[in-house]
Structures are given as C-alpha cells and as structure tokens.
Amino acid sequence: MRTRMRLITAAAAAALLIGCTSGPAASKPGPGKPGRPGKDAPRVLVFSKTAGFRHDSIPDGIAAVKDLGAANGFTVDATEDAGAFTDANLGKYAAVVWLSTTGDVLNSQQQSAFEGYIRGGGGYVGVHAAADTEYDWPFYGGLAGAWFQSHPAIQPAKVNVEDHAHPATAHLGDVWNRTDEWYNYRSNPRDRARVLASLDESSYTGGTMSGDHPIAWCQEYEGGRSFYTGGGHTKESYADPAFRQHLLGGVRWAIGAAQADCRPEKGYTKLFDGTAESLGNWKQAGPGSFALKDGTLTTTGGMGMLWYDRRELGSYSLKLDWRMEGDDNSGVFVGFPPSDDPWSAVDNGYEIQIDATDVPEKTTGSVYGFQSADLKARDKALNPPGEWNTYEIRVEGERLRIYLNGVQINDYTNTDPARSLLQGHIGIQNHGADDQVSFRDIRVKDLPSEPGSATAPGSGGH
C-alpha cells in the first residue's frame, strides 16, 4: 500500500532459495547465484567415505552435485579423505555434502573440527545413507536429525510435500511419486526440524513409523544449517530433474543462497490448502479477485481483499507463503471487523506489507504506515522477487510480531484505542492490475490468550 489507494491483506509475492559455511560470518564465502561459478563463488565439499555398505550411486551423486554447482554459481570439490576435516580446510567451504556415507568415517580430532565448523555457521547436507553414519557421535545424530533403522525393497511410493516454500520442495506439487529405497528412522525429527516432505506409508510396503514418516527436513543446528533428504539410493535419482532440483534446493539453502523457515512446525490448521473447496471459507471485498492455479492464489486487479469470514481470531500464529514477480504490492491484514468494504481493514486493522520498494514504514515487513521492519534483519532474511518467502504473523494480546523466513523482523504493540488486535479477521490484498503477488498454504495456530485480553469466539486450540 504505497498510497491510501493501496489496500493490504494476506501474504503475497516474493521468494526463496538457500545457504552457509564455517568460521565467523564475516569470513564465509558469499551466497551463490545462478550461472557459472566466479572467482569468489562459494565452495561445496562432497564427502563420500564409507566404512560400511557402499552405494554404487555415489559417482552419479558426485557428478550431479558438480553439474548443479557449475550451473548455479558454486564450486564443488569431492573427497573420501577424512583428513580434509581440519579447521583450516573446512573453513574454505560453505557446506559439506555427506553423500551416502556409512559407518564411522571420522576420528575424534576430525569430529571436533567438524563440530567447530558447524558452530561457526557451516552448512550440512545429508543424502540418503548419511543417516547410516557415526552412530556413536551424538552431535552428528542431532545434526542429521535421525539415524537409519531399516529399509524395505526399492519400490514406488507417494511422497507428501509439507512445505511448498523451501527451495528443496517449492517446485513440487502436493504429492511427489517416485521410486527409491525408503528408509525407516530410529526417531522422528518433527519436534526438532521442519519436515519438508513425508512418506505415505499406505502407498508402499515396509514403512514402520506409524504413519508419520518424514523423509526430508531442514533445521538450524548449533549455529549452522542442516538439510537432509532420504532419497538418493538409486543411480536413476541423480538423472531425475525433480530430484536434482530437490538436491539443489537443499544445497542452496545450506550455503545461504536462499532463505527458508526451518523451525519445527506443528499444530497448524490450513485456512487455504490450495483447493477450490477451501476458498468457500473466504470472501472477496471490493473489486478484482484472485486466480487459483496449481494450489496458488495470484492477485488479479483491485483494489480489493480476500478475507477469511468463518471466524475472528484472538491470540494466534498465522503463517503463509508469498511470492512477488517484481516491484509489486500487496499485504496481509489482521485485526479488522467483518465487512464487505476493503477499506474497513485499512481503517480498523493493521497491514503487514509486501512491497519491494517504498519508504521503510511502507515496505516489506513493515506494519504499514506505523512501524518499519528491522531493515538489516529483513534484507538478510528476504528472498528476491520470483522466489517464495514465508511470513509468520504472531498476535498475542495487542502485541504483533512479524517473522520472515523464520527471522523476527518486527515487534509492534498497538496503543490506538480505535484499533485492536484482541480479535478480528485476517485477509490478503489484491492491490491493482499492475501488481502480481501469489500466496499459498495459509495456516493458523491458536495461542493461549494473554492475561486480561479478550478471547476471540471459537479460538480453542488445535
């Protein structure tokens, strides 16, 4: 909303993709960009030493990561020499890919160097049998997220995509059908990591995780970044464009070339799940509309707002993914009363802005017209136009906090008696014909009411 003629509402437009390395942040290589690696391109080390079963797909995996690096702005070295795990050598790399390693592959000094690398901001990418590695090293088990337990025969299965904003899964639909060797794990990483995809155990035989079977996840761990995928047993995986993009997204996030919210996520209810049926709970106020395609809502015309009319919200966490194509404008409205007039949200609620260029209090991450985001934190967390971003808008009493890709960028407390965050509706804006912003996966989680605050009708926990 650059002028009063800019209404604002739920999540829009912008994007996602990935990164990290060892040592102090100032000494790390910069994020990679699409295209050929340059002199200062970040480096990635592929480590594939095995002390147990050896996968015959390892050469294919190394070749795939090298190809991805050549096309996407990072340089790749490959080794099976554990002697590469020294403070000085690891400091050259933005991430280390553990490619189907097995057994005990590092001695205690090498383990200590790798721990220091991760704690200094390094990136880890675990592929397939990386979970079948270093069972007596607790730090590594936490970093990988879970250890291997067993597997059935190679077979087709349905992979349910849970996160459509992370660059490792943003290119996928709700279900990814593929053939691989599907690991069972000794523990479930969901409480510690953001699960990006999980297996539908009814779609194949041999799953042992009681129907909640994560297969790819990410997390911030001990100062570093960790991405793991259970795929990649077969040679064919590394020739599959969808799996290669999955692997690329994981590497790009680990090296810091793209951002994503990798905090654990549980207890959210979808208000918009990508289907036409879920839109039956939303109403359009004012002109314009939203086009639905491939599970994504994209703004058309305006100025108007699409708002969720089934209930008012009290204390809650609202999450949604958004992407803009260029210098576009949209926003997410919170705390407004029911109305078919989109200006009611402007006058009675608050807008969390989406706008690539404007003054600080009217650009992405701001409480529009009231408070700028922390611009340094915002710029570091933000993915550029064309890529997905994730907002968490957290309302507790009259306090409003905004997180971008997992990083808090704004903290605002309402003191205006004409406005209140204690209860109200949420909405997303279609700003105008020249603005193209997309939204998906709009979800909410009720939070305990602040002491002394009003409780919205129907705001029981999920």
Image: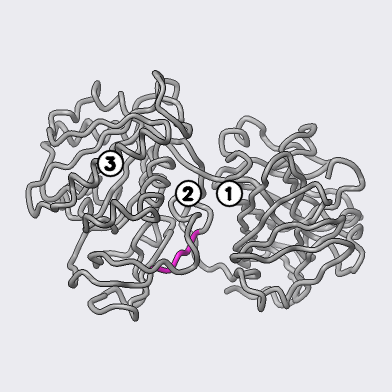
The residue nearer to you, when weighing 163 against 416, is 163
Determine whether, in the image, residue 425 is placed left or right of residue 411: right
Q: Mark 3 points at which residue?
A: 97
Mark before the other along the chain sequence, 2 or 3:
3
Query: In the drawing, what numbered circle is on residue 430?
Result: none
Q: Does dot 3 land on a helix, a strand or a loop?
A: strand
Gap in Å between the C-alphas at discs 2 and 3? 17 Å
Q: Is residue 160 above or below residue 189?
A: below
Instruction: Tell me the magenta residue range.
Output: 159-163
* Image coords of residue 335 (percent x, y): 79, 60
Gap in Å between the C-alphas at discs 3 and 1? 24 Å
Q: Does dot 1 land on a helix, a strand or a loop?
A: loop
Mark before the other along the chain sequence, 3 or 1:
3
* Image coords of residue 234 (percent x, y): 22, 58
Determine whether, in the image, residue 231 is placed left or right of residue 135: right
Residue 403 falls within the magenta-colored stretch: no
Question: Which quadrant holds the N terminus?
Answer: top right
Q: For the residue marked with disc 2, what is the amino acid?
A: Pro
Residue at the top extreme, as displayed: 39
Q: Mark 2 points at which residue?
A: 167
- Scheme of image coloration: one colour
* Image coords of residue 231 (percent x, y): 29, 58
The residue nearer to you, when weighing 317 against 351, is 351
